């Protein structure tokens, strides 16, 4: 497992703080383990709790197809230099049916022709939101032609939420 000495806050070992028992139970129930990320987040019970609720909604409770979701997450990780996030999501992408060719292509600076049209659309959104913040009207119109209002909110929130994840990981030096 190696040492995590470079992480900029202490890790909170599960079961060491009674006041965190409820949130630790929810994390275990939803994810089956308390990952390194959650051991960092548990330094703040309210943040860990809200984070778990938001990310569970994004990952498990939207209508965004799993393969599109995982492609967006991998792309955010690449653009933000969040190797921990990328490595954590490769198995999820594979389970969702994303080919190894597409997983590799997500690492390229440009968007490859290996992607299907809807994949390209959400990756273009990911790039716009992550690199430039502002999403051009022309791109939003194409997104609105492909997704209903619920879908647009869910796809945009997926990119936004995983930008939050990667930026926390990078800021706190959670890299392995």
Image (cartoon, grey):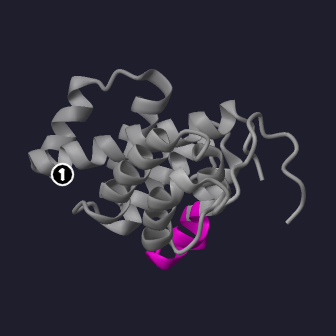
- Please say whether residue 88 is one of the residues in the magenta stretch: no
Side of 55 where 78 appears, left or right: right
Q: Quadrant of residue 133?
A: top left
Residue 27: where, in percent of width, then height?
48, 63
Q: Nearer the viewer, residue 172 or 162?
A: 172
Q: Residues within 10 Å of mark 1 (few under 14, many from 20)?
A: some
Q: Quadrant of residue 161?
A: top left
Side of 113 where 58 appears, left or right: left
Location of residue 172 with respect to 62 vertically, above or below = above
Location of residue 9 with respect to 40 vertically, above or below = above
Side of 145 where 2 appears, left or right: right
**Residue at 25% over, 49% down:** 154
**Which segment did they paint magenta?**
89-102
Residue 153: where, in percent of width, then height?
21, 43
Q: Nearer the viewer, residue 106 or 112?
A: 106
Residue 168: where, in percent of width, then height?
59, 35
Residue 20: where, in percent of width, then height?
52, 53
**Residue at 89% over, 54% down:** 3
Label 1 sits on residue:
151
Q: Quadrant of the N terminus?
A: bottom right
- Please say whether residue 97 is one of the residues in the magenta stretch: yes
């Amino acid at each position: 497992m190696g040492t995590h000495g470079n992480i900029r806050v202490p890790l909170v070992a599960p079961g060491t703080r009674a006041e965190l028992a409820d949130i630790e139970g929810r994390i275990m129930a939803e994810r089956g383990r308390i990952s390194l990320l959650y051991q960092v987040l548990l330094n703040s019970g309210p943040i860990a709790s809200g984070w778990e609720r938001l990310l569970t909604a994004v990952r498990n409770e939207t209508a965004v197809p799993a393969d599109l979701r995982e492609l967006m997450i991998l792309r955010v990780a690449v653009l933000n230099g969040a190797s921990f996030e990328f490595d954590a999501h490769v198995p999820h992408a594979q389970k969702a049916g994303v080919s190894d060719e597409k997983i590799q292509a997500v690492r390229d600076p440009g968007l490859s022709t290996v992607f299907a049209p809807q994949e390209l659309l959400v990756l273009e959104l990911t790039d716009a939101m992550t690199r430039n913040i502002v999403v051009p009207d022309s791109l939003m119109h194409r997104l609105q032609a492909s997704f209903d209002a619920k879908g647009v909110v869910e796809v945009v929130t997926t990119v936004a939420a995983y930008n939050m994840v990667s930026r926390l990981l990078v800021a706190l030096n959670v890299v392995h």
